[in-house]
Image (cartoon, rainbow, N blue to C red):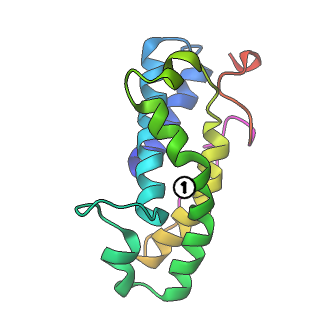
Amino acid sequence: MKMLQFARVQIISAVQEGRASAPHFWEKIECFLLHYRNLIQFLGGSEKRKDDLSFTADFGDQIDETLIIAIEKVVKPLVEKYSNQISKYLAHCTRLRHELDRDWYINEMYFELLPAIHLLRSAFGLQAWNQQGDMVLKWGESLLDTSLM
């Protein structure tokens, strides 16, 4: 979760500082996507390999079932919406990556997942993240929108 937040902050800083076209900017996007996909698959993915950690399988006995249901309600749609897209985009030498220079709506993705992060943190007695001053872009704006650069 911390790497996801770190990558998002790095992306926003790059946009603010006019560094959104540098190769390192795309590295930050890939970092965000990788950690986003890993987190949504951990919390709500149903396709698992034998050695994959699973929130419900590995930690479900430590958490109230209503909290697990609430987290899955947030995350399962995100797995369906983003998991395959991200996996195909991050894979090397795919047609999708070659042909599609797409916008990733980082803030929208982040704020769609944030309720599950807050629930997860509260399940383990951790304080919810303070978002004051953290959001630079409006919800739903693309980081690749040229009006932001």
Give above or below for 16 relative to 105: above
In percent of width and height, residue 85 lies at 54, 39
In percent of width and height, residue 123 lies at 46, 78
Q: Few, some or many C-alpha atoms within 10 Å of disc 1 (few <14, some 14-19, many ≥20)? A: many
Q: Which amino acid does label 1 sit on?
A: Val
Q: Is residue 31 left or right of residue 83?
A: left
- The one of 121 and 59 positioned closer to us in this rendering: 59
For residue 56, which quarter of the picture? bottom left
- Quadrant where the C terminus is found in the figure: top right
- Magenta region, main secondary structure: loop
Give above or below for 95 relative to 81: above
Residue 112 in view in this figure: yes
In percent of width and height, residue 77 lies at 63, 59
For residue 20, which quarter of the picture? top right
- Quadrant where the N terminus is found in the figure: bottom left
Give above or below for 131 relative to 48: above
In percent of width and height, residue 4 lies at 45, 45
Q: Which residue is at a point 45% across and 39% down the rendered structure image? A: 87
Q: Which residue is at a point 57% across and 46% down the rendered structure image? A: 82
For residue 69, which quarter of the picture? bottom right
- Residue stretch in magenta: 129-139
Q: In this view, does 70 lie to the left or right of 42?
A: right
Question: Magenta stretch: residue 69 in it?
Answer: no
Q: Residue furthest front?
A: 95
Q: Which residue is at a point 28% across and 61% down the rendered structure image? A: 52
According to the image, label 1 marks what residue?
Answer: 79
